[in-house]
Image (cartoon, rainbow, N blue to C red):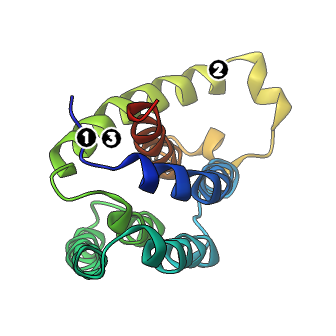
Amino acid sequence: MQFHLSFAEAALFLPFVAPICLWIIWSDLSRMKIPNVANMALLAVFVLLGLFVLEPGAFGWRLVQLAIVLVLAFLANIIGMMGAGDSKFLAAAAPFVAPGDAVAVLMLLAAITLCALAVHRAAKKSALRQMAPDWVSWSNDEKFPMGFALGGTLIAYLLMGLLRGA
């Protein structure tokens, strides 16, 4: 699979994005909530660092991606397809995806979602659950903490961009 994300983008974004995504993963697993401040931090990273690594036209188009994903994710939230935090995360993460990588990232998201679901369900029934017995996601059989898969996907995508240049 060929990605369009540049090594420079991945190298600059990953050290700042990964901790935010790990926070989002932990929060969604433990509380079934993705904090707005985490999504805003993700967006701030893109705005502040994107100016250094992207040409002005490319930067502008990435912000257009954010707006498009925000509208689509908001509509998905309205009809009950996803939670509001997931929708806001998708919008905040959208500008990190290079044009031309959308289909590849959706495939990556599908694979990581299946893995995250399997890992979560297995951990829920194992001794690992005792390490965090109060996590809300353990007792919620109707909903899955998608922040686990969404955050993991953005980290994986940026890592793949980094490895591309290695």
Lower position in the chain sequence, tag 2 or tag 1: 1
Q: CA distance from mark 1 to mark 3?
A: 14 Å
- The numbered disc on residue 109 is 3
Image coordinates of residue 110 in percent, x first then y, are 29, 36
SS state under label 1: loop
SS state under label 3: helix
Q: CA distance from mark 2 to mark 3?
A: 24 Å
- Residue in front for this viewpoint, 90 or 52: 52
Q: Using the rendered view, name the quadrant where residue 97 is placed.
A: bottom left
From the viewer's perspective, is the residue at label 2 or at label 1 nearer? 1
- Residue in front for this viewpoint, 130 or 9: 9
Image coordinates of residue 104 in percent, x first then y, are 21, 40
Query: Does residue 137 appear to the left or right of 108 in the view shown?
Result: right
Q: Are marks 1 and 3 in contact (CB under 8 Å)?
A: no
List the residue tagged with mark 2.
125
Q: Residue at the spot x=68%, y=50% of the render?
A: 26
Q: Residue at the spot x=61%, y=45% of the render?
A: 137
Lower position in the chain sequence, tag 1 or tag 3: 1
- The numbered disc on residue 3 is 1
* Amino acid at dot 1: Phe
Q: Are marks 2 and 1 in contact (CB under 8 Å)?
A: no
| Above or below 153: residue 15 | below
- Residue in front for this viewpoint, 39 or 65: 65
- Residue in front for this viewpoint, 144 or 49: 49
* Amino acid at dot 3: Leu
Q: Are marks 2 and 3 in contact (CB under 8 Å)?
A: no
Quadrant, the N terminus:
top left
SS state under label 2: loop
Number of dots carrying numbers? 3
